[in-house]
Image (cartoon, rainbow, N blue to C red):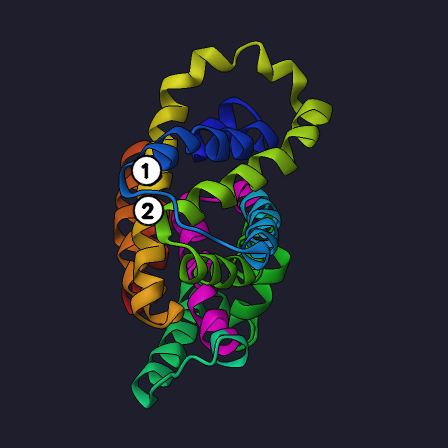
Amino acid sequence: MKDLGHSLDEYINVWGRFFFLLPFALAASWVVGFPEVGWEYWLYSFLAGFSQVISTLLLSKSFKHGEISVTVTIWKLQVVFLAVFGVLFLHETITPGGTAGILVSLFGVYLLNMRRARLSLAEPILLLLREKGMRYALLAALALTPTILLFKKTALVGDPFFSTLTNYIFASALIFPLVIKKSSRHLAVLPRYSGRFFALGLFGASATIFGCSGYILSAAAYVEAVKQIEIPLTLAVGVLFFNERERVQAIWPGCLIL
């Protein structure tokens, strides 16, 4: 996604992730069978698609303006927001151990910018608001919280396969007018990147289906906490493909805590 964001722009990048996911989601839903759903499902699915557009646009902008290793780590603050909103809106239960884990996550984000602490103890936190890539990553984490909760709701009302399909149909349809307005010049060269978009769609569909299956079985915050395994993998990608070795060396203690 970061690589495509540098080659194209964030609008067609986000739309491509949504649109090229659909064939894989449709195939999976076709195999397991389509569930019967009522009107409330379609309302939740539309809201999930709308929220997904906002959160993914913010994430794409954070990839464009910041290092992938830092972006994904800060983006994982969604676990903290999910724990709070999951309790408030879905009546999920967070144990004392879960609360301790949230506090550890917050400390890990602080350690990401520990070198700035010599200026003031508040400087590592203030940097999240000052640096453009970090700011977009923090906003993406905030916006992703209602997205995940709505994806969980649609998975509970329908099933993980069908909810993935319909949520992304709405998302791709909602963002397409913006693509026409902002990125029409890139549509002509889209076939050149179709292989990368199909790969992005395959991984996106798989991650969403497995994630929604997890949401049904446990608190959404716990599922996202387990997915913190993305952080060391992202550090490796940042070093190997995006020349972020120096930045990774500076932030690895915070990433390890997370």
Residue at 31% x, 60% y: name it. Answer: 228
| Mark 1: secondary structure | helix
Residue 92 at x, y percent in the picture: 42, 79
| As drawn, 187 above or below 123 | above
The residue nearer to you, when weighing 1 against 46, is 46
Residue 32 at x, y percent in the picture: 28, 43
The residue nearer to you, when weighing 154 against 16, is 154
The C terminus is located in which quarter?
Answer: bottom left
Q: Give the magenta-colored segment's residue range.
A: 59-85
**Amino acid type indicated by mark 2:** Ala
Asked whether disc 2 touches disc 1, contact meaning CB atoms under 8 Å apart, the reply is yes
Identify the residue under disc 2: 207
Residue 1 at x, y percent in the picture: 43, 34
- Rendered image: mark on residue 203: 1
What is the magenta segment's predominant secondary structure?
helix
Q: Residue furthest right?
A: 181
**Amino acid type indicated by mark 1:** Phe
